[in-house]
Amino acid sequence: MRLGVLDIGSNTVHLLLVDAHPGARPVAFASHKRPLSLVQFLDADGNINDAGQHELIEFVLEAWEFAARHKAEDLLAFCTSAIREATNGVEVLARVKHETTVTLQELTGSEEASMTFFAVRRWYGWGAGPILDLDIGGGSFEMAFGQDELPELAVSVPLGASRLTRDWLHYDPPTAKSVKELRKYIRHTLKPVVREFKQLGRANLVAGTSKTFRSLARIAGAAPSGAGPYVKRELHATDLGLWAQRISAMTVEDRLYLPGVSDARAAQILAGALVAEAALEMFEFPSMEICPWALREGLILRRLDQLIFDGPLAPAPHVGLGGAVPVPRLGANAGTAAPAAVSLPIPIAGRQAN
Protein backbone atom coordinates (compact mmCIF):
# COMPACT_ATOMS: atom_id res chain seq x y z
CA MET A 1 0.00 0.00 0.00
CA ARG A 2 1.06 3.61 -0.46
CA LEU A 3 0.92 5.57 2.77
CA GLY A 4 1.34 9.31 3.21
CA VAL A 5 2.50 11.17 6.31
CA LEU A 6 1.86 14.90 6.46
CA ASP A 7 4.10 16.46 9.11
CA ILE A 8 3.47 20.07 10.13
CA GLY A 9 6.58 20.82 12.13
CA SER A 10 8.07 23.97 13.57
CA ASN A 11 10.73 24.38 10.86
CA THR A 12 9.33 22.59 7.83
CA VAL A 13 6.09 21.19 6.48
CA HIS A 14 6.66 17.84 4.84
CA LEU A 15 4.62 15.17 3.08
CA LEU A 16 6.34 11.79 2.77
CA LEU A 17 4.87 8.98 0.68
CA VAL A 18 6.09 5.45 1.32
CA ASP A 19 5.31 2.05 -0.10
CA ALA A 20 4.91 -0.55 2.60
CA HIS A 21 2.86 -3.44 3.87
CA PRO A 22 2.62 -5.10 7.29
CA GLY A 23 5.89 -6.80 8.15
CA ALA A 24 7.95 -4.90 5.57
CA ARG A 25 10.20 -1.89 5.98
CA PRO A 26 8.69 1.32 4.58
CA VAL A 27 10.40 2.45 1.37
CA ALA A 28 10.23 6.14 0.46
CA PHE A 29 8.35 6.75 -2.80
CA ALA A 30 8.24 10.54 -3.01
CA SER A 31 8.17 13.63 -0.81
CA HIS A 32 6.97 17.20 -1.00
CA LYS A 33 8.16 19.81 1.51
CA ARG A 34 9.03 23.44 2.04
CA PRO A 35 10.66 25.48 4.79
CA LEU A 36 7.95 27.06 6.93
CA SER A 37 8.88 28.26 10.39
CA LEU A 38 5.50 28.85 11.97
CA VAL A 39 7.11 30.31 15.08
CA GLN A 40 8.26 33.21 12.91
CA PHE A 41 4.59 34.04 12.30
CA LEU A 42 3.71 34.40 15.99
CA ASP A 43 2.45 37.79 17.13
CA ALA A 44 3.05 39.36 20.55
CA ASP A 45 0.19 37.33 22.05
CA GLY A 46 1.49 34.00 20.75
CA ASN A 47 -1.03 33.70 17.91
CA ILE A 48 -0.10 32.41 14.47
CA ASN A 49 -0.94 35.41 12.30
CA ASP A 50 -3.01 35.39 9.13
CA ALA A 51 0.06 35.25 6.86
CA GLY A 52 1.30 32.12 8.63
CA GLN A 53 -2.13 30.51 8.43
CA HIS A 54 -2.30 31.27 4.73
CA GLU A 55 1.12 29.64 4.13
CA LEU A 56 0.05 26.57 6.12
CA ILE A 57 -3.27 26.17 4.28
CA GLU A 58 -1.59 26.59 0.92
CA PHE A 59 0.87 23.80 1.72
CA VAL A 60 -1.78 21.43 3.10
CA LEU A 61 -3.73 21.81 -0.17
CA GLU A 62 -0.55 21.17 -2.17
CA ALA A 63 0.23 18.11 -0.06
CA TRP A 64 -3.29 16.71 -0.37
CA GLU A 65 -3.22 17.05 -4.14
CA PHE A 66 0.30 15.55 -4.28
CA ALA A 67 -0.87 12.53 -2.26
CA ALA A 68 -3.99 12.10 -4.40
CA ARG A 69 -2.02 12.41 -7.65
CA HIS A 70 0.36 9.67 -6.51
CA LYS A 71 -2.51 7.40 -5.42
CA ALA A 72 -1.92 7.37 -1.67
CA GLU A 73 -4.32 4.96 0.03
CA ASP A 74 -3.84 6.24 3.56
CA LEU A 75 -2.82 9.58 5.05
CA LEU A 76 -1.63 10.41 8.54
CA ALA A 77 -1.75 14.18 9.06
CA PHE A 78 -0.34 15.62 12.26
CA CYS A 79 1.16 18.73 13.80
CA THR A 80 3.56 19.26 16.67
CA SER A 81 4.70 22.06 18.96
CA ALA A 82 4.34 25.05 16.60
CA ILE A 83 0.55 24.71 16.55
CA ARG A 84 0.24 22.87 19.86
CA GLU A 85 1.68 25.82 21.76
CA ALA A 86 0.21 28.67 19.71
CA THR A 87 -2.44 30.65 21.59
CA ASN A 88 -4.86 30.26 18.67
CA GLY A 89 -3.85 26.69 17.81
CA VAL A 90 -7.41 25.35 18.06
CA GLU A 91 -8.70 28.05 15.72
CA VAL A 92 -5.89 27.40 13.24
CA LEU A 93 -6.69 23.68 13.13
CA ALA A 94 -10.37 24.45 12.60
CA ARG A 95 -9.57 26.83 9.75
CA VAL A 96 -7.29 24.27 8.08
CA LYS A 97 -10.05 21.67 8.26
CA HIS A 98 -12.66 24.10 6.91
CA GLU A 99 -10.56 25.27 3.96
CA THR A 100 -8.84 21.99 3.03
CA THR A 101 -11.08 19.22 4.50
CA VAL A 102 -7.89 17.78 6.07
CA THR A 103 -7.94 17.17 9.81
CA LEU A 104 -4.55 17.78 11.38
CA GLN A 105 -4.14 15.68 14.52
CA GLU A 106 -2.33 17.56 17.26
CA LEU A 107 0.25 15.36 18.96
CA THR A 108 1.17 16.06 22.55
CA GLY A 109 4.83 16.30 23.46
CA SER A 110 4.79 12.84 25.07
CA GLU A 111 3.09 11.33 22.01
CA GLU A 112 5.71 12.89 19.77
CA ALA A 113 8.54 11.55 21.93
CA SER A 114 6.92 8.11 22.19
CA MET A 115 6.36 7.61 18.48
CA THR A 116 9.90 8.74 17.72
CA PHE A 117 11.20 6.25 20.28
CA PHE A 118 9.05 3.56 18.65
CA ALA A 119 10.82 4.18 15.32
CA VAL A 120 14.24 4.09 16.99
CA ARG A 121 13.47 0.78 18.66
CA ARG A 122 12.40 -0.72 15.34
CA TRP A 123 15.57 0.53 13.68
CA TYR A 124 18.00 -0.82 16.28
CA GLY A 125 16.01 -3.85 17.45
CA TRP A 126 15.80 -5.62 20.79
CA GLY A 127 19.54 -6.28 20.86
CA ALA A 128 20.18 -2.61 21.57
CA GLY A 129 18.81 -2.98 25.09
CA PRO A 130 17.68 0.16 26.94
CA ILE A 131 17.63 3.18 24.62
CA LEU A 132 17.63 6.90 25.33
CA ASP A 133 16.33 8.91 22.37
CA LEU A 134 16.89 12.65 21.99
CA ASP A 135 15.12 14.78 19.37
CA ILE A 136 15.61 18.53 18.90
CA GLY A 137 12.80 20.16 16.96
CA GLY A 138 12.13 23.78 16.16
CA GLY A 139 9.84 24.39 19.12
CA SER A 140 10.61 21.62 21.59
CA PHE A 141 13.14 19.01 22.69
CA GLU A 142 11.89 15.47 23.21
CA MET A 143 13.49 12.76 25.33
CA ALA A 144 12.37 9.15 25.75
CA PHE A 145 13.82 6.10 27.52
CA GLY A 146 12.84 2.46 27.66
CA GLN A 147 13.59 -1.21 27.09
CA ASP A 148 10.41 -2.02 25.16
CA GLU A 149 8.85 -0.74 21.94
CA LEU A 150 7.21 2.15 23.75
CA PRO A 151 9.15 4.16 26.32
CA GLU A 152 8.90 4.03 30.08
CA LEU A 153 9.28 7.80 30.17
CA ALA A 154 8.64 10.33 27.39
CA VAL A 155 9.10 14.06 28.03
CA SER A 156 8.97 17.24 25.97
CA VAL A 157 10.52 20.54 27.09
CA PRO A 158 10.47 23.98 25.38
CA LEU A 159 14.06 23.84 24.14
CA GLY A 160 13.50 23.80 20.39
CA ALA A 161 16.29 25.32 18.30
CA SER A 162 14.11 27.89 16.55
CA ARG A 163 12.38 28.94 19.77
CA LEU A 164 15.67 29.43 21.63
CA THR A 165 17.21 31.38 18.76
CA ARG A 166 14.23 33.73 18.65
CA ASP A 167 14.09 34.22 22.43
CA TRP A 168 17.79 34.36 23.34
CA LEU A 169 20.14 34.96 20.39
CA HIS A 170 19.25 38.40 19.05
CA TYR A 171 22.53 39.41 17.41
CA ASP A 172 24.55 38.05 14.49
CA PRO A 173 26.93 36.75 15.64
CA PRO A 174 25.48 36.38 19.14
CA THR A 175 27.14 38.06 22.09
CA ALA A 176 29.18 35.97 24.51
CA LYS A 177 26.79 37.04 27.27
CA SER A 178 23.70 35.79 25.41
CA VAL A 179 25.35 32.42 24.71
CA LYS A 180 26.35 32.09 28.37
CA GLU A 181 22.84 32.95 29.55
CA LEU A 182 21.29 30.48 27.10
CA ARG A 183 23.62 27.70 28.28
CA LYS A 184 22.50 28.40 31.85
CA TYR A 185 18.81 28.38 30.89
CA ILE A 186 19.14 25.07 29.00
CA ARG A 187 20.81 23.36 31.94
CA HIS A 188 18.31 24.80 34.41
CA THR A 189 15.44 23.45 32.29
CA LEU A 190 17.00 20.02 31.81
CA LYS A 191 18.18 19.42 35.38
CA PRO A 192 14.92 18.08 36.91
CA VAL A 193 14.09 16.11 33.76
CA VAL A 194 17.49 14.41 33.61
CA ARG A 195 17.17 13.52 37.28
CA GLU A 196 13.86 11.80 36.56
CA PHE A 197 15.34 9.81 33.66
CA LYS A 198 18.35 8.71 35.68
CA GLN A 199 16.08 7.02 38.20
CA LEU A 200 15.10 4.52 35.49
CA GLY A 201 18.63 3.28 34.86
CA ARG A 202 21.30 3.79 32.23
CA ALA A 203 20.83 3.33 28.49
CA ASN A 204 22.99 1.06 26.36
CA LEU A 205 22.46 3.38 23.40
CA VAL A 206 21.80 7.09 22.99
CA ALA A 207 20.16 7.98 19.68
CA GLY A 208 19.66 11.36 18.04
CA THR A 209 16.69 11.60 15.68
CA SER A 210 16.32 15.05 14.20
CA LYS A 211 17.65 17.15 11.35
CA THR A 212 19.52 19.23 13.92
CA PHE A 213 21.45 16.19 15.16
CA ARG A 214 22.13 15.05 11.58
CA SER A 215 23.47 18.50 10.69
CA LEU A 216 25.68 18.63 13.79
CA ALA A 217 27.07 15.17 13.07
CA ARG A 218 27.79 16.18 9.47
CA ILE A 219 29.60 19.32 10.65
CA ALA A 220 31.70 17.12 12.95
CA GLY A 221 32.71 14.82 10.09
CA ALA A 222 29.96 12.19 9.73
CA ALA A 223 29.08 10.81 6.30
CA PRO A 224 26.78 12.91 4.10
CA SER A 225 23.16 11.89 3.55
CA GLY A 226 24.08 10.72 0.06
CA ALA A 227 26.02 7.83 1.59
CA GLY A 228 22.70 6.25 2.53
CA PRO A 229 20.89 5.40 5.78
CA TYR A 230 22.95 2.33 6.69
CA VAL A 231 26.24 4.17 7.25
CA LYS A 232 26.92 4.49 10.96
CA ARG A 233 26.97 8.13 12.04
CA GLU A 234 28.07 9.28 15.48
CA LEU A 235 28.27 12.59 17.27
CA HIS A 236 30.87 12.86 20.03
CA ALA A 237 30.54 15.23 22.97
CA THR A 238 34.12 16.50 22.52
CA ASP A 239 33.45 17.43 18.88
CA LEU A 240 30.12 18.95 19.81
CA GLY A 241 31.66 21.20 22.45
CA LEU A 242 34.36 22.35 20.04
CA TRP A 243 31.91 23.13 17.24
CA ALA A 244 29.43 24.85 19.55
CA GLN A 245 32.22 27.25 20.51
CA ARG A 246 33.23 27.80 16.88
CA ILE A 247 29.67 28.33 15.63
CA SER A 248 28.99 30.87 18.39
CA ALA A 249 31.65 33.12 16.81
CA MET A 250 30.28 32.76 13.26
CA THR A 251 27.68 34.85 11.48
CA VAL A 252 24.65 33.12 10.00
CA GLU A 253 26.09 33.67 6.53
CA ASP A 254 29.38 32.02 7.51
CA ARG A 255 27.53 28.97 8.86
CA LEU A 256 26.15 28.27 5.41
CA TYR A 257 29.64 27.14 4.39
CA LEU A 258 29.55 24.35 6.98
CA PRO A 259 28.67 20.89 5.62
CA GLY A 260 25.07 19.85 6.21
CA VAL A 261 23.78 23.33 7.14
CA SER A 262 20.88 24.65 5.05
CA ASP A 263 19.57 28.19 4.70
CA ALA A 264 16.59 27.29 6.86
CA ARG A 265 18.72 26.03 9.76
CA ALA A 266 21.82 28.22 9.67
CA ALA A 267 20.43 30.71 12.20
CA GLN A 268 19.35 28.07 14.72
CA ILE A 269 22.18 25.52 14.50
CA LEU A 270 23.98 27.16 17.44
CA ALA A 271 20.97 26.82 19.75
CA GLY A 272 20.62 23.19 18.67
CA ALA A 273 24.31 22.57 19.38
CA LEU A 274 23.99 24.05 22.87
CA VAL A 275 21.01 21.81 23.68
CA ALA A 276 22.77 18.73 22.32
CA GLU A 277 25.96 19.56 24.23
CA ALA A 278 24.08 20.06 27.49
CA ALA A 279 22.06 16.85 27.05
CA LEU A 280 25.09 14.62 26.47
CA GLU A 281 26.94 16.25 29.35
CA MET A 282 24.06 15.99 31.82
CA PHE A 283 23.11 12.43 30.83
CA GLU A 284 26.84 11.62 31.09
CA PHE A 285 27.36 10.04 27.69
CA PRO A 286 30.46 10.61 25.54
CA SER A 287 28.67 10.14 22.23
CA MET A 288 25.42 9.34 20.47
CA GLU A 289 24.38 7.52 17.29
CA ILE A 290 22.34 9.28 14.62
CA CYS A 291 19.22 7.27 13.77
CA PRO A 292 17.74 7.77 10.27
CA TRP A 293 14.21 6.97 11.46
CA ALA A 294 12.17 9.39 13.56
CA LEU A 295 8.59 10.54 14.14
CA ARG A 296 7.23 10.05 10.62
CA GLU A 297 8.58 6.50 10.46
CA GLY A 298 7.17 5.77 13.91
CA LEU A 299 3.68 6.77 12.81
CA ILE A 300 3.99 4.72 9.63
CA LEU A 301 5.14 1.61 11.48
CA ARG A 302 2.41 2.04 14.07
CA ARG A 303 -0.19 2.26 11.31
CA LEU A 304 1.12 -0.92 9.68
CA ASP A 305 0.95 -2.73 13.02
CA GLN A 306 -2.69 -1.71 13.31
CA LEU A 307 -3.37 -3.23 9.92
CA ILE A 308 -2.02 -6.53 11.22
CA PHE A 309 -4.10 -6.52 14.38
CA ASP A 310 -7.11 -4.69 12.95
CA GLY A 311 -7.14 -2.18 15.74
CA PRO A 312 -4.90 -0.01 17.90
CA LEU A 313 -2.24 -1.52 20.10
CA ALA A 314 -2.58 -0.33 23.67
CA PRO A 315 0.50 1.69 24.67
CA ALA A 316 1.91 1.96 28.13
CA PRO A 317 -0.58 4.18 30.01
CA HIS A 318 2.09 6.33 31.66
CA VAL A 319 3.27 7.91 28.39
CA GLY A 320 -0.13 9.45 27.73
CA LEU A 321 -0.91 8.15 24.25
CA GLY A 322 -4.55 7.68 25.08
CA GLY A 323 -4.93 4.36 23.22
CA ALA A 324 -3.53 5.15 19.78
CA VAL A 325 -1.82 7.61 17.55
CA PRO A 326 -4.15 9.05 14.87
CA VAL A 327 -4.49 6.76 11.88
CA PRO A 328 -7.11 8.02 9.43
CA ARG A 329 -8.39 5.48 6.89
CA LEU A 330 -8.57 6.28 3.22
CA GLY A 331 -9.07 4.73 -0.18
CA ALA A 332 -11.33 1.71 -0.26
CA ASN A 333 -12.02 2.06 3.46
CA ALA A 334 -12.81 5.78 3.43
CA GLY A 335 -15.92 6.58 5.35
CA THR A 336 -16.00 3.32 7.29
CA ALA A 337 -16.03 3.32 11.04
CA ALA A 338 -12.56 3.48 12.60
CA PRO A 339 -11.66 1.70 15.84
CA ALA A 340 -12.71 3.62 18.93
CA ALA A 341 -9.27 5.06 19.65
CA VAL A 342 -8.56 6.10 16.05
CA SER A 343 -9.21 9.53 14.58
CA LEU A 344 -11.76 10.26 11.90
CA PRO A 345 -10.69 9.60 8.31
CA ILE A 346 -9.21 12.12 5.91
CA PRO A 347 -10.90 10.97 2.68
CA ILE A 348 -8.32 11.43 -0.05
CA ALA A 349 -10.12 9.12 -2.42
CA GLY A 350 -13.41 10.92 -1.89
CA ARG A 351 -12.28 14.51 -2.45
CA GLN A 352 -12.04 16.06 -5.88
CA ALA A 353 -8.73 17.73 -6.66
CA ASN A 354 -8.88 21.15 -8.30
Image (spheres, rainbow, N blue to C red):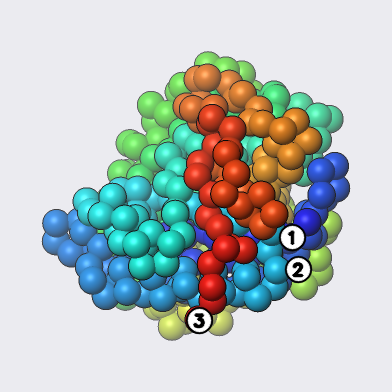
* Total numbered circles: 3
| Mark pair 2, 1: CA separation | 8 Å
In the structure shown, which secondary structural element does the residue marked by tag 2 occupy?
strand
Label 3 is placed on what type of residue? Asn
Residue at the spot 55% in from the left edge and 58% down from the top edge: 347
Q: Amino acid at mark 1?
A: Arg
Which-is-in-front pick, marks 2 and 3? Answer: 3
Quadrant containing the N terminus is bottom right
Element on which disc 3 rests? loop
Q: Is there a contact, CB below 8 Å, between mark 2 and mark 3?
A: no
Between discs 2 and 1, the one toward the N terminus? 1
Q: CA distance from mark 3 to mark 1?
A: 22 Å
Look at the picture and state if 292 lies above or below 202: below
According to the picture, the residue beneath numbered tag 2 turns out to be: 29
Which residue shows up at 31% across the image and 68% down it? 53
Residue 42 visible in rendering: yes
User: Residue tagged by mark 1?
Assistant: 2
**Percent of width and height locating residue 117:** 63, 38
Question: Foreground residue, 160 or 350?
Answer: 350
